[in-house]
Amino acid sequence: MTHKSQDDKQRHNTPLFFWMTALLFTCLCWTPAWADSLDQQQLVEKASHTVSSFMEDPNLTWFQDHVKEAKALLIIPQQLKAAFFFGADGGSGVLVANDAKTGEWGEPAFYVLGGLSFGFQFGGEASEVIILAMTQGAVEKLYSSSFKLGGDASIAAGPYGAGVEGATSANLNADFLSFSRSKGAYAGVSLEGSIIYTDDDSNQAYYGKKIRPVDILVTKSVKNEHSAGLRQAITTATK
């Protein structure tokens, strides 16, 4: 390939990269940095409703039977997907971890899930997502500022229904299992390649000071009484 053709290829790819970045940024940034605690309270309330709806869905019996085995739950009440030749998805959510010593579920920490996909595709959709952290290594990954699903930690789509069909040992041994519902129906989706990162602005707004996820999830140095409904919903689901 000549030097000229390489330059032409680079110029051709630059607009695509620009629009990919712009679309991902748009999808992920609907929660503004200046959001006050009311935004976070609403997200926590929506997360509580998501847990309840998953527990009532007759198509998610495997989830209902095994959610108690999870060490932590990342709950995303609304994951938005947009596609125009390539896709971008993202959503704000809360992570609640279980204390192995007491069996109690702690205060929520705020996270964002985002990713890109490639291929000829159009349209958009919204879905509810719950990701189960099944291993201690998975939980420890969540203490970091960001990590990639499928790269830094393994993830698989959780079994549908009772999980008899397609529930391979490889899937069930993954660090994370993901479950999603779209418009009230089961919507299996692969989150491999997506990035999870902490939402420091939301954590600060909700707890009234700068705080790290490890302070919320491990040392438990902060509390917010508003989270009682979510923690109760998870406690009920994991009995």
Image (cartoon, rainbow, N blue to C red):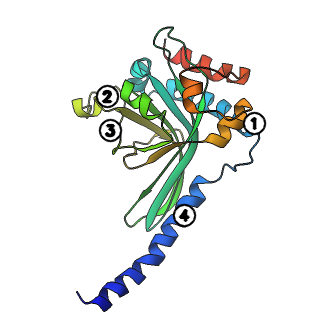
Query: Mark 3: which amino acid?
Result: Ser
Separation of marks 1 and 2 at Cα, in angstroms: 39 Å
Question: Residues at badges 1 and 2 in contact (C-beta under 8 Å)?
Answer: no
Of residues 99 and 163, the one drawn nearer to the viewer in this rendering: 99
Question: Mark 3 or mark 2: which comes first in sequence?
Answer: 3
Separation of marks 4 and 2 at Cα, in angstroms: 35 Å
Does residue 115 sit above or below 78 in this rendering?
Answer: below
Separation of marks 3 and 1 at Cα, in angstroms: 33 Å
Q: Position of residue 224 (x, y in %)?
A: 71, 23
- Disc 1 secondary structure class: helix
Of residues 148 and 43, the one drawn nearer to the viewer in this rendering: 148
Q: Position of residue 64 (x, y in %)?
A: 44, 22
Query: Mark 1: which amino acid?
Result: Ser
- Report the residue marked by disc 2: 163
Q: Which numbered marker is on residue 37?
A: 1
Quadrant of res 107: top right
- Report the residue marked by disc 3: 154
Residue found at x 29% / y 29%: 172
Question: Mark 3 or mark 1: which comes first in sequence?
Answer: 1
Q: Which numbered marker is on residue 23?
A: 4
Separation of marks 4 and 3 at Cα, in angstroms: 26 Å
Q: Position of residue 119 (x, y in %)?
A: 37, 65
> Is residue 14 toward the left or the right of residue 28 in the image?
left
- Disc 4 secondary structure class: helix
- Disc 2 secondary structure class: loop
Quadrant of res 234: top right
Instruction: For the N terminus, give its image quadrant.
Output: bottom left
